[in-house]
Amino acid sequence: MRVDLHTHTTASDGLLDPRDLVHAARRAGVGVLGVTDHDTVDGIPEALEAAQKLGVTVIPGVELSVEHGEEELHLLGYFVDYQAGWFRDLLEKLRASRVDRIREMVRRLERLGVSISLDEVRRSGQGTVGRAHLARALVSAGFVRTPVEAFERFIGRGKPAWVPRKTLSLEEAIGAIREAGGLAILAHPGRSRALAHVAALKAVGLDGIEVYYPDHTSYQVRQLLALAQELGLLVTGGSDYHGDGVSTGAPLGDPYVPPEVVRSLKERRRARDAVSEMRD
């Protein structure tokens, strides 16, 4: 049985709908699947329904973006209460900010002579509109050859059409995940300079770090494992799967994530639930 705790569906910027993602996971030998769409939990009910029929365990999750200093960090929330009205309302506000951001990016692209409409961006995918949709639209319109080129030339951080978006603060995002009953995990820390701040992040409620990730080198994995052990943080991992050949390009279930990762997550959640019950 393989474990993949970082995947996306058409509810945000993935290419597979939740049911098809679960079927693909089953074919790939993935027995535990984290569904972690950007700023939405809309795909979770369908994924859970499909998983029940196929014998796959789905962990309800979400991925939130936060601005921390000069960097954009991503937080994964596991075991969130995806039915909580206040949490869904919060996510809806974050999705609205995504649309505003893409609208401004389209304006900036127009000024650069790259004419593309918001409707074209919307047609490039389903779910929460984001930069992945814009990148695919730029490919379809012939302005770039690949989504990666779109990010490198136009819409990546610091590029001519880059627009920062309104996000939660780090403390607000961690607090929201935990209030929703979830565990807050720093996603792909090897992609950022966040490692120097992990101890400070733990102090504001961070539960763990994503260690097993396609872009992490073997050295980074060892470094992250040592850091997690030193600070008493949970360890997770996943492919960041958006569809074949998209995002990291890693297939479902790659890299290998040890099954004990799931056990540790469940134990931490049970312990927190027990503390909450005692307080009640």
Image: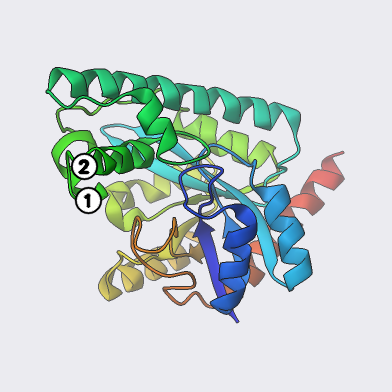
The picture quadrant where one finds residue 57 is: bottom right
Q: Is residue 213 above or below residue 171?
A: below
The front one of 38 and 22 is: 22
How far apart are the two marked residues, 1 and 2, measured between alpha carbons? 7 Å
Residue 76 horizontal/vertical position (percent): 52, 49
Q: Relative to residue 9, is residue 197 drawn left or right?
A: left
Mark 1 vs 2: CB contact within 8 A: yes
Residue at image coords 59%, 26% = 92
Q: Determine crowd level at label 2: few under 14, some 14-19, many 20+ residues with C-alpha closer than 10 A.
A: many
Quadrant in the picture for the N terminus: bottom right
The front one of 48 and 182 is: 48
In the rendered picture of this protein, how many numbered marks are placed on residues? 2
Residue at image coords 83%, 40% = 279
Identity, as a three-letter code, of the amino acid under mark 2 = Ala
Residue 63 in sight in this render = yes
Q: Determine crowd level at label 1: few under 14, some 14-19, many 20+ residues with C-alpha closer than 10 A.
A: some
Identity, as a three-letter code, of the amino acid under mark 1 = Thr
Circle 2 sits on which residue? Answer: 150
Q: Secondary structure at mark 2?
A: helix
Residue 198 horizontal/vertical position (percent): 39, 50
Residue 45 horizontal/vertical position (percent): 73, 49
Residue 204, labelled with which disc? none
Residue 30 in sight in this render = no
Q: Secondary structure at mark 1?
A: loop
Residue 146, labelled with which disc? 1
Q: Relative to residue 38, is residue 262 drawn left or right?
A: right
